[in-house]
């Protein structure tokens, strides 16, 4: 890859989730040269892993489809997938950026025909489903993947399966000789859209995540509910595939806790309220929400009220103390004290969903003009979406537009200075 793909009048957007896509498009459609770097094999980020948005309960693929069409139509925007930004130095007007481009082992000739996948039998954990399901080692990351190209997993490169995948491709798109490449580019402004990651629920020892099979996280539950997910949209227990009829949602799982995440992640309450709708749509199943308080503000209050009116949803004001297993049935027993009435409970459920909080996901060295708060969210610099603070999709897009405008103003000043000289 050529190394002069950017100048000090280029805007670099780090992260190709909904915030990164939005920021890149806003800047590019204003006539600026933009590079969008995403470390995964496709754009969309965690938004692509959602089944539905709240409060309208629409599917995220609708908005993403529009944005992908805008990307394809814009010549000012260059997208680099499987590209990991490992370091940024300098300051506004003159950044030096080091990036690693990981091999996809499939080039631009790919027509997404799927013949390479049909030729292999090896399977790997499906990252899109948070590892709940598996996919072939030659795979298309998503039905709406951008770029619409397959990926050959490194585990079969140099093996008989890799050779079969290469031979199955009629257009010569499978390239098993691709190597990791490191490049450095220049940028005049950087937008940080590095996104978030779910808090590691295994650190919350009393809840048994990772030890108790039927304790899962809210992001995993989102994939279970999706018809394109590992269970075909059936809400089932991981332990035995039995349909979940009595689901518990535990709020603030690791959030607002001095031992874990000090901050409120803002989206968790609404995510769980939304997910009770998934349960109520699944025949005669019921939900119980264990909460400290429900934080549903502005336009979300009406949605909260509708969930409260649903007879299949029960609310218990309590921070669950512990979860134990009934080995004979596989059911889980939630232990705690209901603070409305102050009585102890030992409630039985067949599936428990932990509403885990949001952690910022940076994973790189930051330049001196970018600072973070006590939780690791970016305060200095142009942060978009959940890189700046815990935000839902709508507010992430608003944040991205703001970051793009600041970045554009930087490039405008650089251009004006160079013209004057």
Image (cartoon, grey):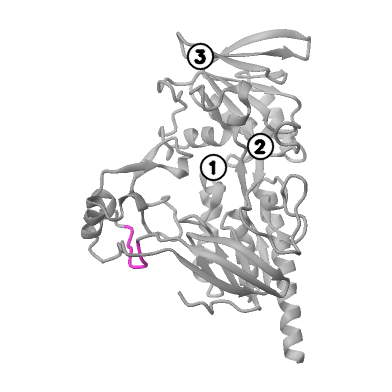
Magenta stretch, overall SS? loop
The mark that comes first in sequence, 3 or 1, is: 1
The mark that comes first in sequence, 3 or 2, is: 3
Alpha-carbon span between mark 3 and mark 2: 25 Å
How packed mark 2 is, by other alpha carbons closer than 10 Å (few <14, some 14-19, many 20 or more), is many
Q: Is residue 82 left or right of residue 378?
A: left
Residue range corresponding to the magenta coloring: 106-112
Q: Is residue 402 magenta?
A: no
Tell me the number on the disc at residue 118: none
Alpha-carbon span between mark 3 and mark 1: 27 Å
Q: Which residue is mark 2?
A: 357
Measured from the top left, where is residue 385 in percent x and y? 67, 53
**Residue in the foreground of this view, choosing between 302 and 151:** 151
Q: How many marks?
A: 3
Residue visible at 63% across and 31% down in the picture:
355
Identify the element where label 2 is drawn.
loop
Q: Which residue is mark 1?
A: 50
Residue visible at 51% across and 77% down in the picture:
3
Quadrant in which residue 53 is drawn: top right
Q: Which residue is mark 3?
A: 331
Identify the element where label 3 is drawn.
strand
């Amino acid at each position: 890859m050529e190394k002069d793909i950017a100048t000090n009048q280029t805007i670099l957007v780090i992260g190709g989730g909904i915030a990164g896509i939005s920021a890149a498009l806003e800047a590019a459609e204003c006539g600026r040269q933009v590079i969008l770097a995403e470390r995964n094999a496709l754009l969309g980020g965690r938004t692509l892993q959602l089944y539905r948005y709240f409060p309208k309960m629409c599917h995220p693929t609708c908005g993403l489809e529009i944005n992908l069409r805008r990307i394809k139509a814009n010549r000012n925007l260059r997208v680099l997938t499987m590209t990991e930004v490992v370091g940024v130095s300098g300051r506004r007007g003159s950044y030096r950026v080091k990036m690693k481009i990981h091999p996809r082992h499939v080039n631009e000739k790919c027509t997404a025909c799927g013949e390479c996948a049909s030729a292999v039998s090896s399977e790997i954990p499906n990252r899109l489903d948070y590892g709940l399901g598996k996919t072939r080692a030659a795979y298309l990351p998503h039905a709406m993947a951008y770029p619409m190209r397959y990926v050959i997993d490194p585990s079969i490169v140099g093996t008989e399966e890799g050779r079969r995948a290469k031979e199955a491709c009629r257009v010569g798109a499978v390239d098993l000789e691709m190597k990791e490449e490191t490049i450095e580019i220049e940028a005049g402004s950087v937008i940080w859209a590095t996104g978030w990651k779910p808090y590691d629920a295994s650190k919350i020892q009393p809840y048994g995540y990772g030890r108790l099979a039927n304790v899962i996280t809210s992001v995993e539950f989102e994939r279970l509910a999706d018809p394109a997910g590992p269970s075909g949209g059936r809400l089932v227990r991981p332990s035995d595939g039995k349909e979940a009829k009595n689901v518990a949602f535990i709020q603030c799982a690791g959030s607002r806790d001095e031992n874990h995440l000090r901050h409120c992640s803002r989206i968790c309450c609404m995510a769980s309220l939304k997910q009770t709708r998934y349960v109520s749509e699944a025949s005669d199943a019921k939900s119980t929400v264990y909460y400290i308080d429900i934080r549903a503000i502005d336009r979300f209050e009406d949605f909260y009220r509708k969930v409260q009116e649903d007879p299949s949803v029960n609310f218990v004001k309590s921070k669950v103390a512990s979860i134990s297993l009934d080995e004979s049935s596989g059911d889980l027993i939630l232990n705690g004290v209901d603070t409305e009435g102050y009585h102890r409970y030992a409630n039985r459920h067949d599936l428990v969903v932990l509403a885990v909080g949001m952690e910022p996901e940076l994973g790189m060295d930051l330049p001196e003009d970018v600072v973070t708060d006590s939780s690791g969210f970016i305060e200095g610099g142009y942060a978009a979406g959940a890189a700046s603070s815990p935000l839902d999709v709508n507010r992430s897009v608003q944040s991205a537009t703001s970051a793009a405008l600041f970045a554009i103003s930087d490039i405008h000043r650089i251009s004006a200075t160079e013209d004057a000289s």
